[in-house]
Amino acid sequence: MKNEIIEILTNAHFSKEFVEYIKNEFPADFIPLIEQPYQYDFPDNPLLDLSKKELMHTLMYELIPLKDFFDRRNIPDNIFYDSLDDINFRINRYYNIHGEYGVSERDALWLRFIYKGEIFDLGSLRFQKFHFSNAEIERSDYDYMPLSDEMKRRFPEGEPVINVHIQTNADLRPEKIDESFEMAHEFFTTYFPEHDYTVFTCRTWMLYPPTQDILPPDSNITSFANRFEIIATNHNTKQALDRIYKTSDMEEIEQMEKHSSLAEVAYKNLDKLGVAAGVIYKVKSEQ
């Protein structure tokens, strides 16, 4: 079991330091305290009652049944290993903040999508097998983004969709995005034909229409945004600030050096920042 985990981590390009940590710290006779932990809903998931070390060991153990899931679907190994990248990212982020390996409660919640076999890294983008959810689009508090009655009629609750996620430092060049969407369509129609999706959906600051006014016409962000039909917007700036500056604290942003043209122009045009949700219909050959 331990050797299987180490092989998975190595093939998925987790850091040598973390692989060494697992070699030294993961018990050879490990027995998980919770079977199939992501069958339980949050916030009542028993994972959150584990110690940091027990949580880490459990998540490593669960890589084995996850690999079995990919194998049963005949999904290529390279897609399996690529799709573990977000686990690697969150473990390293925790280490950089706390000086020890672990994952936060919030990250343990997010990672359920990977461990349930619903998120896949395909080229420059990350795609999630999902069902349209008014609650996921609209949310609440500062993040509230109401959907019109027309949009609720067009996109019924529970309709199969593919949700698009944009990783930090994703390659947004148009040809790479074309490639990712083509890969995604081929992937889901081949390995999850029962998930007969109608649209790709995305909810991000990059789609907010006024943001395009402050970007150059040849911007990769603008090119990406123009692919989508916008179905809802919110003028709240928090997500944009967090993604551009890694903080939404305006005093902190004011003091920091702006090392990119985007960081410079966004700071001067806060009224142009917000978040939006959009859709792209299936590739034309399938319509």
Image (spheres, rainbow, N blue to C red):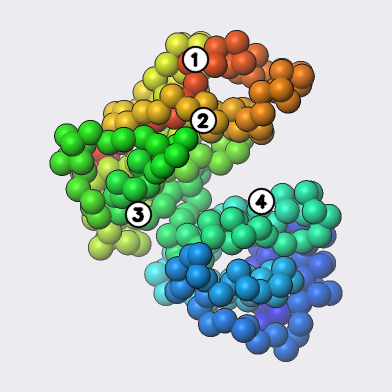
Q: Earlier in the sequence, mark 3 or mark 2?
A: 3
Q: Which tag, 4 or 2, sits closer to the chain's start?
A: 4
Mark 3 and mark 4 in contact? Answer it, CB < 8 Å.
no
Crowdedness of circle 2 by 10 Å Cα count: few (<14), some, many (20+)?
some
Q: Which residue is farthest front?
A: 141
Q: Amino acid at mark 2?
A: Leu
Residue at x-position 81% and y-position 75%: 25
**Three-letter code for the amino acid on which mark 3 is drawn:** Phe
Left or right for 233, reference 65: left
Q: Position of residue 116 (x, y in %)?
A: 46, 66
Disc 4 residue type (three-letter): Phe
Image mark for residue 89: 4
Q: Do the residues under discs 3 and 1 have CB atoms within 8 angstroms? A: no
Q: Which mark is residue 271?
A: 1
**In front: label 2 or label 1:** 1
The numbered mark at residue 130 is 3
Q: Nearer the viewer, mark 4 or mark 2?
A: 4
> How much space separates mark 3 and mark 2, taking CA atoms?
23 Å
In this rendering, is residue 64 above or below 155? below
Disc 3 crowd, CA 10 A, few/some/many (<14, 14-19, 20+): many
Precedes in sequence: disc 3 or disc 4: 4
Whole-angstrom CA distance, mark 1 to mark 4, is: 32 Å
Label 1 near label 2: C-beta < 8 Å? no
What residue sits right under mark 2 in the picture? 172
Q: Are marks 3 and 2 in contact (CB under 8 Å)?
A: no
